[in-house]
Image: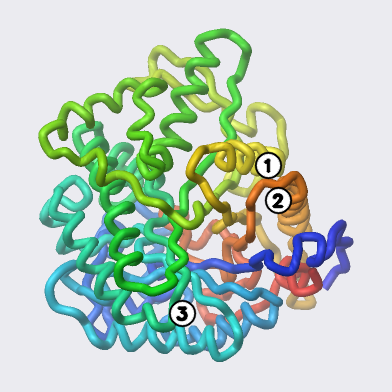
Amino acid sequence: MQQTAIPFTRKDFGDDFLWGVTISAFQNEGASEQDGKGASIWDTFSRRKGKIKDKNHALVACDFYNRYTQDILLAKLLGFTVFRFSLSWSRIMPNGTGSVNQAGLDYYHRVIDACLEVGLEPYVTLYHWDLPQALENKGGWCHRGVIFAFEEYVRVCARAFGNKVKNWIVLNEPFGFTALGYMLGVHAPGKFGLSYFLPAVHHVALAQAEGGRVLREEVAGANIGNALSCSQIIPYTNKEKDMQAARRADALFNRLFLEPALGMGYPVQDFPLLKRIERRYALWRDWDRLAFDFDFIGIQNYFPLVVKHNPFMPVVKISEVKARSRNVPVTALGWEINGNGLYEILKQFAACKGVKKLIVTEGGAAFNDVREEDGNIHDTARIAYFREYLAAVLKARQEGIPVDGYFAWTLTDNFEWTEGYRARFGLVHINFDTQQRTIKDSGYWFRNL
């Protein structure tokens, strides 16, 4: 390992600060057809020609299903105190509703018990993008019945694990999976257009609140949050049209699911298109059901967005000014590296009335890691990234912003959705031919911190 200076200490963040690492079921588990698991939309989507780079799939992924003990021990070895993972809905309820797969419940009991045995606090995410295909066949998040199926699923999980798990995250990045999967069609289930996106948004917004209510009812002392993707929005110029574009982008990317949960409804003032949701569901009397008093909001920030007005862009009239065109530091995926963007978004979310506490529930960077002749991975760029972003968190915390934890994405290299295995975010390198784990310098850096 190459020694890299750490400009702060763990104590600077306070004894109550949470240090976590994050994985997800579909990206890590593999075992896609074992022990009664049903198909998810990502199982289906990954089989479609040309959707995943290099024709990759997640049939095995990181084999976390069989190697969970090893990976949990790695998380402990690196010094973390929190292990965040998600449950596979289709592993627990293969058809999305109805019959429960006991083998799925037993598996997650083993994972939870392994965390508790080594002193890692489990933070369980109920939904991390892998909707059961059986529900998608009925319309998926575009169909109102998915809300009731989700309530049923959450109740099964709460009753099964609530005596062991007190920290819950209802949904992971609702804007991400609705926009990418139900508007742009580039993620599962591959649907395109507003006719899919708007109903999906509304049903997901209802589901995040209903899921929270089920947890509150079923789990005594539950600590309930929701994990939202978010970016500082920066107008390209001070021209009024660019400023308006930035306000629209902020409503869409940052506030679309936050404000309904806070009882504010959809941000229609800055994004009038959302009035279509209000008109479509006017007779359902859903508006009071959108709100839920979350104990914390998960912040998932990777980069700021610079935007400008684009009259030729359908619907939103916004286009991004790409980071590479602005000659700023970027990751292997072309995402801007800018810790100040995280600081600014923490300030923005903390200022929202009704937000009690923030946790950075994901943060990390993909780089083109190279294994040296000595077998080590000297990922100094990733270390610099974490140093910059954690400094931003510390600055916010010292200013009184209630940010109470940072969870690194991710423990091991994994199946990174449409990027396949090209995009490596892990603190631990995986040889996907042999499943050999090798701790990167960034992993040792966290251990030293």
Q: What amino acid type is highlighted by mark number 1?
A: Tyr
Please identify the quadrant where the C terminus is shown. Answer: bottom right
Of badges 3 and 2, nearer the viewer stands: 2
CB-based contact (under 8 Å), mark 2 and mark 1: yes
Q: What amino acid type is highlighted by mark number 2?
A: Val
328 to 153, vertically: above or below? above
* Image x and y of residue 205, in percent: 30, 45
Q: Residue at x 13, y 56 (%)?
A: 137
* Image x and y of residue 348, in percent: 59, 36
Separation (CA) of disc 2 from disc 1: 6 Å
Residue 14: quarter of image: bottom right
Residue at the spot of label 3: 64
Q: Residue at x 52, y 42 (%)?
A: 230
Label drawn at residue 343: 1
Q: What amino acid type is highlighted by mark number 3?
A: Phe
Label drawn at residue 393: 2
